[in-house]
Image (tube, grey):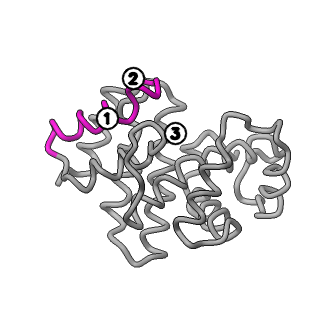
């Protein structure tokens, strides 16, 4: 299996935009936290989170993403279940339904990390340190806020995972706090 350093190098070869790298870090952190929560392999889940959008800058359309990423990862020698998780995070495009707990989690936190980051950015502190679940839920109801985030995917993911939305939000906030500076948040 590839190390985090090797994976990050490959990710950065294909993604130059700071926002995309930050998103990869956010999803990686969330996947690690959920792996701990579910008593799964934190390193493996983290790498899947880090690499899930490897193709985004080069192939951002729903006709190609995440299929091109899966192809890239396969060619590099990433395991089949790793590649399947990447495909399943783009269920709507790839047609690969999330089946495993890892796949369901990636499908859900991909969008959720973006929403939580957006909420933090509009706060006076621009930080996750004082962000509460109720603040996220309040913004959730504002359909004009963070329109690019597909709330239906997060809700569907919550159902697939069998976890309440509030739990998912809370765990994701806590997962992102230690890396908030890497996400362009905080002081």
- Between the residue at mark 2 and the residue at mark 1, the CA separation in whole angstroms equals 8 Å
Whether the residues at callouts 2 and 1 have beta carbons within 8 Å, the answer is yes
Q: Which badge, 2 or 1, is on the more N-terminal residue?
A: 2
Which residue is disc 3 drawn over?
22
Residues 25 and 75: in front is 75
- Between the residue at mark 3 and the residue at mark 2, the CA separation in whole angstroms equals 18 Å
Q: Quadrant of residue 67?
A: top left
Task: Assign a secondary structure to mark 2.
Answer: loop
Query: x, y percentage for residue 66?
Result: 38, 36
Number of other residues with Cα within 10 Å of mark 1, as a class: few under 14, some 14 to 19, many 20 or more: many
Left or right placement of residue 60 versus residue 6 in this view: right
Residue 68: say if magenta. yes
Task: Assign a secondary structure to mark 3.
Answer: helix
Of the numbered discs in the image, which one, if any, rests on residue 59?
2
Of the numbered discs in the image, which one, if any, rests on residue 69?
1
Q: Residue at x 42, y 56 (%)?
A: 98
């Amino acid at each position: 299996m590839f190390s985090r350093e090797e994976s990050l190098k490959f990710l950065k070869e294909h993604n130059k935009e700071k926002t995309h790298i930050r998103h990869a870090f956010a999803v990686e952190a969330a996947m690690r936290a959920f792996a701990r929560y579910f008593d799964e392999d934190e390193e493996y889940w983290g790498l899947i989170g880090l690499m899930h959008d490897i193709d985004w800058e080069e192939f951002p359309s729903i006709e190609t993403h995440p299929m091109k990423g899966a192809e890239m990862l396969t060619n590099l020698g990433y395991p089949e279940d790793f590649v399947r998780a990447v495909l399943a995070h783009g269920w709507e495009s790839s047609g690969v339904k999330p089946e495993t707990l890892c796949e369901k989690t990636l499908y859900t936190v991909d969008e959720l990390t973006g929403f939580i980051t957006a909420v933090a950015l509009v706060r006076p502190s621009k930080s996750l340190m004082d962000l509460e679940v109720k603040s996220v839920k309040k913004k959730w109801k504002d359909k004009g806020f963070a329109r690019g985030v597909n709330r239906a995917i997060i809700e569907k993911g919550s159902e697939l995972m069998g976890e309440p939305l509030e739990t998912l939000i809370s765990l994701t906030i806590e997962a992102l706090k230690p890396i908030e500076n890497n996400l362009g948040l905080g002081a």
